[in-house]
Image: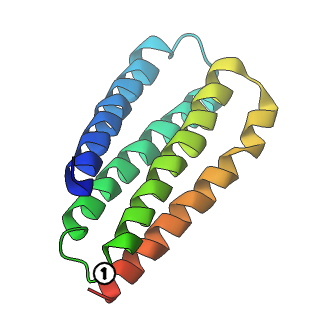
Amino acid sequence: MTTTRLFILIASCFAFLAVAAGAFGAHGLKQRLTLEMLDVFEVGARYQMYHALALLAVAWLCPTASNPRLATIAGWFFVAGILIFSGSLYLLALTGVRWLGAITPIGGVAFLAGWLLLALSAWKA
C-alpha cells in the first residue's frame, strides 16, 4: 500500500471515529459527565477531526513533494498526536483520572511538529 493510500485510510478511520465520538459525547454522555468533562471530551473529538483532515493534506502532498519523507513524518506525528492528545482527553473525561491531563501536551507537541514538517514539505515542493 502506498503512503498516500495508507494516510487516506487512517484519516478516514479517524474522521469516522471523531464523528462517532462527537455524537456519543453529545447524546450518550450528556447525562453522565459534568459540563467540564463533556467539554474535555468534545475538545478531543474536535482535534481528532482537525488532524484527520490534516492527514488528508499529507496524503495529497506526499506524491508531489520534493521531499516526501518530511510529509510522511508529518503524517505520523499527526497520528501520534491524535492517539496521545485526543486519547488522553477521552480517557480523562470518561475516567476522571486527572494525571491523564499531563499526557495531553505531548500530543499537542506532536501536532505542532506535524504542522511544522508539513509546512517545510510544502515549502520545499
Q: Is residue 18 left or right of residue 40?
A: left
Q: Quadrant of residue 88?
A: top right
Toward the viewer: 74 or 92?
74
Please name the residue shown 49% across and 35% down the image: 42
Q: Quadrant of residue 58?
A: bottom left
Please name the residue shown 30% across and 44% down the image: 11
Q: Is residue 37 left or right of residue 67?
A: right
Q: What colouring method underlies this structural image?
A: rainbow
Above or below, comparing residue 24 to residue 65 in the picture = above
Number of numbered discs: 1
Please name the residue shown 51% across and 15% down the image: 29
Toward the viewer: 17 or 121?
121
Above or below, comparing residue 104 to residue 120 in the picture = above
In the rendered image, which residue does mark 1 sit on?
122
Toward the viewer: 21 or 7?
7
Q: Is residue 37 left or right of residue 28?
A: right
Whole-percent x and y of residue 57?
A: 26, 62
Above or below, comparing residue 111 to residue 39 in the picture = below
Q: Amino acid at mark 1?
A: Ala
Q: Secondary structure at mark 1?
A: helix
Whole-percent x and y of residue 107?
A: 60, 51
Q: Residue pushed farthest right?
A: 99
Whole-percent x and y of residue 117?
A: 45, 74
Q: Residue pushed farthest bottom?
A: 124
Q: Is residue 84 left or right of residue 16?
A: right
Above or below, comparing residue 100 to residue 56 in the picture = above
Whole-percent x and y of residue 61?
A: 23, 70
Mark 1 crowdedness (10 Å alpha carbons): few <14, some 14-19, many ≥20:
some
Image quadrant where one finds the C terminus: bottom left
Toward the viewer: 106 or 38?
106
Q: Quadrant of residue 91?
A: top right
Please name the residue shown 49% across and 45% down the image: 82
